[in-house]
Image: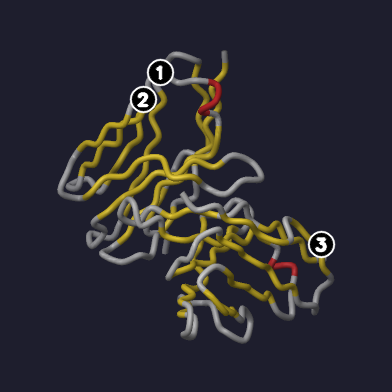
């Protein structure tokens, strides 16, 4: 049972445009959500997070939106840059240190 | 931020053998985590390792198959025992940052191929 789902395995966006990565979850007990970025041959690195008491969190070019009623979150990257090309994982936790990860979306930003 | 190294970075092993993966952190940490990422799959938590106590395994993972050691606050090992091709995965260790809630720093991973 996949509690965190990223239904788009890949996304291709032109440089300068907006990238929108989506994530759905099924467990209503999740209270914290995170996005990680992963380059080849490296471990995932933390990008941005959001608590379930908020619906938006912004950090520079990255904004995460949370829609609890729809059990959906999204990561917006504006403007997209070639260096953003990586695999993006969303993750969730339910009041513990344990993270449940989605399967990832490979983002490619082309010139 | 914590700097985490893993050894080996990759290995190719024969079925039935065992491999021990090392994880070294440049600072003392209470909790260390071991994950597995099978091809095309998400990162799945294998176990949580606290220094001075037995590791806590997630559903579907057992100590006989994945024994873990945590001899001190900067080091841990994960052994993949009696390997089969289904164990071919990337194995990653991580630690909590203590800076942002639930932020974890990950090692670069160990890519294991079992023939």
Q: Which mark is residue B104?
A: none
Dot 1 falls on a residue whose secondary structure is loop
Distance, label 3 to label 2, CA atoms, is 40 Å
Residue at the disc numbered 2 = A61
Q: Residue at x 40, y 55 (%)?
A: B97
Q: Above or below — where is B57 with respect to A98?
A: below
Picture coordinates of residue B53, whole percent (x, y): 46, 85
Q: Is residue B51 left or right of residue B113?
A: left
Q: Quadrant of residue B34?
A: bottom right
Assess disc 1: are there few (<14), some (14-19) or many (≥20) residues with their C-alpha within 10 Å of its C-alpha.
Answer: some
Q: Quadrant of residue A30?
A: bottom left
Residue at the disc numbered 3 = B12
Q: Residue at x 57, y 49 (%)?
A: A43
Tell me, yes or no, whether dots 3 and 2 are on the same chain.
no
Picture coordinates of residue A55, whole percent (x, y): 18, 40
Question: Which quadrant is the C terminus of chain B positioned in?
Answer: bottom right
Picture coordinates of residue A44, whole percent (x, y): 52, 47
Q: Kindly indicate whether the residue at mark 1 contacts the one at mark 2 (C-beta within 8 angstroms).
A: yes
Dot 2 falls on a residue whose secondary structure is loop
Label 2 vs 1, first from the N-terminus: 2
Nearer to us of marks 3 and 2 is 2
Picture coordinates of residue A26, whole percent (x, y): 30, 57
Q: Quadrant of residue B22?
A: bottom right
């Amino acid at each position: 049972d996949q509690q965190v789902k990223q239904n788009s395995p890949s996304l291709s966006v032109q440089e300068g445009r907006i990238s929108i990565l989506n994530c759905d979850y099924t467990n209503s007990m999740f209270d914290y959500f995170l996005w990680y970025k992963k380059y080849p041959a490296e471990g995932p690195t933390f990008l941005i997070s959001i608590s379930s008491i908020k619906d938006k969190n912004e950090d520079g070019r990255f904004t995460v939106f949370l829609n609890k009623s729809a059990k959906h979150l999204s990561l917006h990257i504006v403007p997209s840059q070639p260096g953003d090309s990586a695999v993006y994982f969303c993750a969730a936790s339910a009041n513990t240190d344990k993270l449940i990860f989605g399967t990832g979306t490979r983002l490619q930003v082309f010139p | 931020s914590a700097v985490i190294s893993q050894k080996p970075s990759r290995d190719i092993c024969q079925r039935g053998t065992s491999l021990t993966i090392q994880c070294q952190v440049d600072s003392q940490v209470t909790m260390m985590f071991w994950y597995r990422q099978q091809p095309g799959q998400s990162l799945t938590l294998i176990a949580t390792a606290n220094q001075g106590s037995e590791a806590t395994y997630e559903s579907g993972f057992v100590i006989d198959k994945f024994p873990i050691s945590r001899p001190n606050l900067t080091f841990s090992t994960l052994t993949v025992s009696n390997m089969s091709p289904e164990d071919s995965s990337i194995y990653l260790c991580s630690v909590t940052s203590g800076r942002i809630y639930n932020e974890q720093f990950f090692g670069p991973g160990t890519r294991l191929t079992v023939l």
